[in-house]
Image (spheres, rainbow, N blue to C red):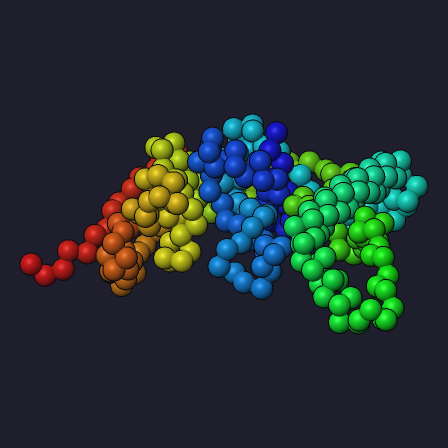
Amino acid sequence: MIRIHVLEGKAFVWNCADVQRIREEHRIVGTLVGALARKPRQNVRLGLPLQLLPEEARLLLEKDVATLIKNPSSKPFADDAEQDPLFLEAVAAYQEEQEESYMEQLRLAAEQRKALLGSLAERIAQGRAKKQQQKGEGGEPLSKPADPESSFVFPRESMMVQLPTERTWLGQEEVDWHLPSKEWPYGGQPEHEMRYCVFQSLWEQGYYITSGSKFGGDFLVYPGDPMRFHAHYIALCVTRDAPLSLCDIISVGRLGTSVKKTVLLCSVDQDGTVVYTSLQWSGMQ
């Protein structure tokens, strides 16, 4: 079951296997919003977590392949966590894993140093002989070199540490997405219901859908994976029978033409059927 974490109305997926699964199996793209551990001061390439649109999260929930959960506290563990057996077990397992990792890195570092000294043994011997010759016959003899294995030191501060991509929380609670709440305020909201009907209709036709905010729309509609295709449509969700000014129609039509995309005005009938109206700027002939 895919776990979708919610925080103040925003849905996140932290598990990388779940992110891969929802994209490959369910055509859900989302948006990576996390900083990369090795390059935190840039925003060109981002990492986990994956933030989902409310419509993307709801589609997974309705397909019964995901569950919506929240964390009961802003702290990863309760105040009395030191007495919690699960907490103590997790700490012991983490410390054991760190110790095993240190011993493995110590062994590999010692082997690498030994191999390096072996490859430089001839040069080292020549250097020592040259120094001995410079001292002359009456000079003090050079001390015997120390055993490289016995003198090798690998400080714990130098060990590599695996950074986790998912936080361990105790006492996770499942959220009922059918009802509006602080964590999930979309249940039963007319605007959300309209957007979801449009999203679901486009998704069922085989399209990939992402947020359309960068082009002034509700959704961008792709014929295939956005990594390989450009969007063909900009979808705007409008309420049925809601008036649209001529200036708004002209502006969105010209916007779609300038970015080589067709604008779709999407509305939902009383029976739940989605009606599409396409706008294309033809100009003067």
Q: In this view, does 35 lie above or below 63?
A: below
The residue sitting at 47% across, 47% down in the picture is: 191
Q: Residue furthest right?
A: 83
Residue 272 percent coordinates (x, y): 39, 34
Q: Which residue lies furthest to the front in this view?
A: 137
The residue sitting at 29% across, 42% down in the picture is: 276
Is residue 70 visible in the rendered structure shown here?
Answer: yes
The residue sitting at 85% across, 71% down in the picture is: 139
Of the 4 image quadrants, the one containing the C terminus is bottom left
The residue sitting at 52% across, 37% down in the picture is: 20
Residue 163 percent coordinates (x, y): 69, 48
Residue 129 occupies quadrant:
bottom right
Viewer-closest of 32 and 53:
32
Position of 175 with respect to 266 (left or right) is: right
Residue 138 occupies quadrant:
bottom right
Position of 7 with respect to 226 (left or right) is: right
Residue 26 percent coordinates (x, y): 47, 32
Position of 133 with respect to 199 (left or right) is: right
Residue 240 percent coordinates (x, y): 35, 45
Is residue 87 visible in the rendered structure shown here?
Answer: no
Viewer-closest of 55 and 178:
55
Viewer-closest of 131 and 72:
131
Viewer-closest of 150 and 25:
150
Q: Residue furthest left?
A: 285
Of the 4 image quadrants, the one containing the N terminus is top right
